[in-house]
Image (cartoon, rainbow, N blue to C red):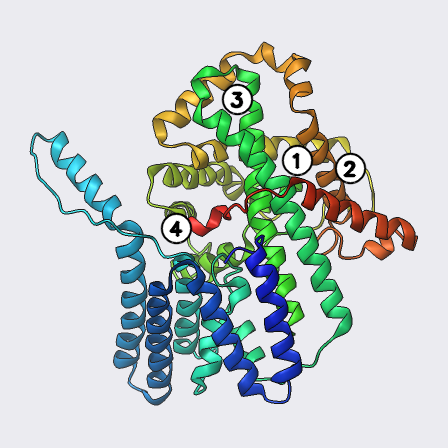
Amino acid sequence: MLFNSIDFAIFLPIVFVLYWFVANQNLKLQNALIVAASYVFYGWWDWRFLSLIIFSSLVDYSIGVALLKQKNEYKRKALLWTSIGINLGFLGLFKYYNFFVDNFVTAFTFFGSEIKPNTLNIILPVGISFYTFQTLSYTIDVYREKLAPTKDFIAFSAFVSFFPQLVAGPIERATNLLPQFYKKRQFDYANAIDGLRQILWGLFKKVVIADQCAELANQIFNNSADYSGSTLFMGALFFTMQIYGDFSGYSDIAIGTSRLFGFNLMQNFAFPYFSRDIAEFWRRWHISLSTWFRDYLYIPLGGSRGGTWMKVRNTFIIFIVSGFWHGANWTFIVWGLLNAIYFLPLLLTNNNRNNLDVVAQGRFFPTLKEVMLMALTFGLILVAWIFFRAENIDHALRYLSSMFSHLGSYFLMGIYIKYRFILMLLLFFMLTEWIGRNYQFAIQEISRIIPNKSVRWATYLFISYMILLTQGKPQEFIYFQF
């Protein structure tokens, strides 16, 4: 079920009413309702894949209970690796089986041998990368004794399948989300209004920004050989804005929806395109995944505690694995590798934690230096996104070559006039994000930014009007494929 669909517009109020007006006196009933609603929400795509979520829930719940009883360290490690093996095994089968088979065949063909492999016509279950990492965080934290294993299977199932963030995150930690299912929730009007405001801004990002940019980006990328360098640059720009609007829009809707039900999810995006270096960008982009890899892979590998070689090795491992997490294509691996290369100079000069504050803190206008650093960082990110979007490595290299081969054409105003409508929308979007960059989402504190109630409501109406004006056939979110 898509957030930006009529189905969800009907589904959400029904669940809300049942949750607060029917099941509000019984915590277990509320949790059971969340499980049922989440299974309906997920099964709307393909009910067959519900078995994977249920099986994953049973496995990790059982292993958590077993870890509580087991004191022998060898057996505890065996239980941990059983969970890791099963979860990553399913992820590998559905997401990476054909990738490894195809590359295995290519390698043998290169050396003069021909083999006929058995590939599978596998449908990738929506959100499998997200809920797999979420359940793994539970087992690992229980093993590390950072979290007491739950004996409430309904609460655990609700944690695994919680519908607002089930298919595209944020990837919640069990230490944050699971305890919220143990506590009685009281309806908080102010929190619910804030949630609705965040949903509205998330829909604007998705429908008005991401979907409009997607139409143009797809047209340009799919026919890149026919366009000039300036148009290819616009295509890369449109995809850069599309993926941010699409993914952060989903996160805003997910977090806002959770607030309607009394839950608080972690912030997943913190205005990443205002970053002054790549390290800051990765502290602000897809925060739930970045911190997951930091805590469950980077630090166990040694983090930054060792010498220079260990720091470099661990950095490349993290970025390459992050790229591979996104999909079974070499373009994602190169995208991760490119980001590691970007990050390396900051790491080697110990400048990777220079920009921990909000840019232009306490000021509206940034300094010239901040503008230049943001422009440079944004340019590097834009180039990396070309590999992320391209069909294959060759397509990405040809796209980049053509884009940079006609530098003079970037100064032709005709190309910008052609795209003036979407560029004006992007200007409004980024200006709003800049004004609200100190908050969890851009219009969170709109009453402070726009004290006049009439102007504030006019802003809400404008955002709503633009959503309705540009709403066409509901488009899936990009990260559903990951």
Q: Position of residue 41 (x, y in %)?
A: 49, 65
3D distance between C-alphas at marks 3 and 4: 27 Å
Q: Sequence order check: which comes first, mark 1 or mark 2?
A: 2
Is residue 351 visible in the rendered image? The answer is no
Q: Are marks 1 and 2 in contact (CB under 8 Å)?
A: yes
Q: Name the residue carrying label 3.
A: 232
Helix, strand or loop at label 4? It is helix
Helix, strand or loop at label 3? It is helix
Q: Name the residue carrying label 2.
A: 366
Relative to 136, does residue 219 appear above or below in the rendering? above
Q: Residue at x 69, y 41 (%)?
A: 469
Q: Name the residue carrying label 4.
A: 325
Mark in the foreground, 3 or 1: 3
Residue 374: mark in rendering: 1
- Of residues 32 and 309, the one nearer the viewer is 32
Mark in the foreground, 4 or 2: 4
Q: Residues within 10 Å of mark 3 (few under 14, many from 20)?
A: many
Q: Sequence order check: which comes first, mark 3 or mark 1?
A: 3
Mark in the foreground, 1 or 4: 4
